Amino acid sequence: MTRTILLSALSLSACLAVATPQVVFAQSSDPVPMEFFAGASGYGHTEAIEKAIAAAKSRGNQAGYFNCRTLGYTWYEYGGVFQASATVVCYKDMGPPPTQPPTQPPPPPTIYEPVRSNNGADHTVSWSTPEPARYALEQSVDGGGWTERYKGYGTNWTAQLAAPANYRYRVKLITNAHEVYSGIVGIAVSTPPPPPLPPVAPSLVAPTHTVTWNASPNADNYVLERSAGDNSWSRVYSGPANAWTAVDMQAGIYRYRVSACSNGACGEASGESVFQVLVDVAPVLQYTLYP
């Protein structure tokens, strides 16, 4: 009786010895975690941290780990540039391999310099990729964090009546498996400068004559307008100089006014100055000198 019990126990041990390796070496379907680390730099600490986290997640994705979450990050500023590092934990599915290999990230979208409208505040940001896709446009104001301003399948967005500030933009291409960022572009929106003094106006000028005006604080551009006796004004010059020359004008009375601009934002026009053009000023000069 004792021998029978012993054989039964040995038989049970043998069964367990055979079954145990099948359990220990079976492939688990539970996700396996792995930590990834990366660093990045940016114009603000928020941008640097976001880029560092994205770089760490990208390393995990390249190694076949997904569903990442941030464990921690640090940052510091040196010479006006912010440096950040981040650690994430990502998970890899150890179950049966997928029937299709993981897709490679698409190339980043191309973002173009913003195009400013005539009022200096409105501006349009546009971007493109080789194939149609879904995008998210993000905006940073004066070096702050990024805010999503547009999401969809369009390739441009217009900021209307933007307040004076420094704006930066980037666009994110969104697919089922990846999010890829473009480079960064920027534009400055400024407060219009005060109007300059009226142009310097001699009482009599020749058909070819020069109109000059004083500089306005913070102005980088001027717009000179002329009226030929009626209430309509036409632009005759736009640029950074403080003088402009009219050539071969017909005799008559002309009015000039000038506006000062900064980063495309132009202020109110100056007062008007009257220029009387004479085809032949010699008799007038002779009379003035020898009445």
Image: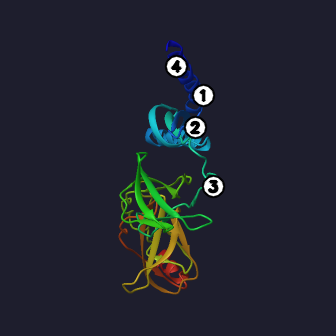
| Residue 52 visible somewhere in the drawing | no
Q: Earlier in the sequence, mark 2 or mark 4?
A: 4
Between the residue at mark 4 and the residue at mark 1, the CA separation in whole angstroms equals 14 Å
Three-letter code, disc 2: Gln
Between the residue at mark 3 and the residue at mark 4, the CA separation in whole angstroms equals 49 Å
Instruction: State which quadrant residue 63 falls in.
Output: top right
Disc 2 to disc 1: CB gap under 8 Å: no
Q: Nearer the viewer, mark 2 or mark 4?
A: 4
Q: Nearer the viewer, residue 100 or 42?
A: 100
Secondary structure at badge 2 equals: loop
User: To which residue does mark 4 refer?
Assistant: 9
Q: Earlier in the sequence, mark 4 or mark 1?
A: 4
Q: Nearer the viewer, residue 174 or 63?
A: 63
The percent coordinates of residue 229 (x first, y second) are 40, 86
Three-letter code, disc 4: Ala
Residue shown at 61% from the left, 53% from the top: 105
Between the residue at mark 2 and the residue at mark 4, the CA separation in whole angstroms equals 30 Å
Q: Nearer the viewer, mark 4 or mark 1?
A: 4
Does residue 62 appear to the left or right of 120 in the view shown? right
Three-letter code, disc 3: Gln
Vertically, is 260 above or below 93?
Answer: below
Does residue 272 appear to the left or right of 21 in the view shown? left
Q: Earlier in the sequence, mark 3 or mark 2?
A: 2
Between the residue at mark 3 and the residue at mark 2, the CA separation in whole angstroms equals 20 Å
Disc 4 to disc 1: CB gap under 8 Å: no
Q: Earlier in the sequence, mark 2 or mark 1?
A: 1
| Residue 100: mark | 3
Q: Earlier in the sequence, mark 3 or mark 4?
A: 4
User: To which residue does mark 2 refer?
Assistant: 27
Three-letter code, disc 1: Val
Q: Nearer the viewer, residue 107 or 239?
A: 107
Secondary structure at badge 4 equals: helix
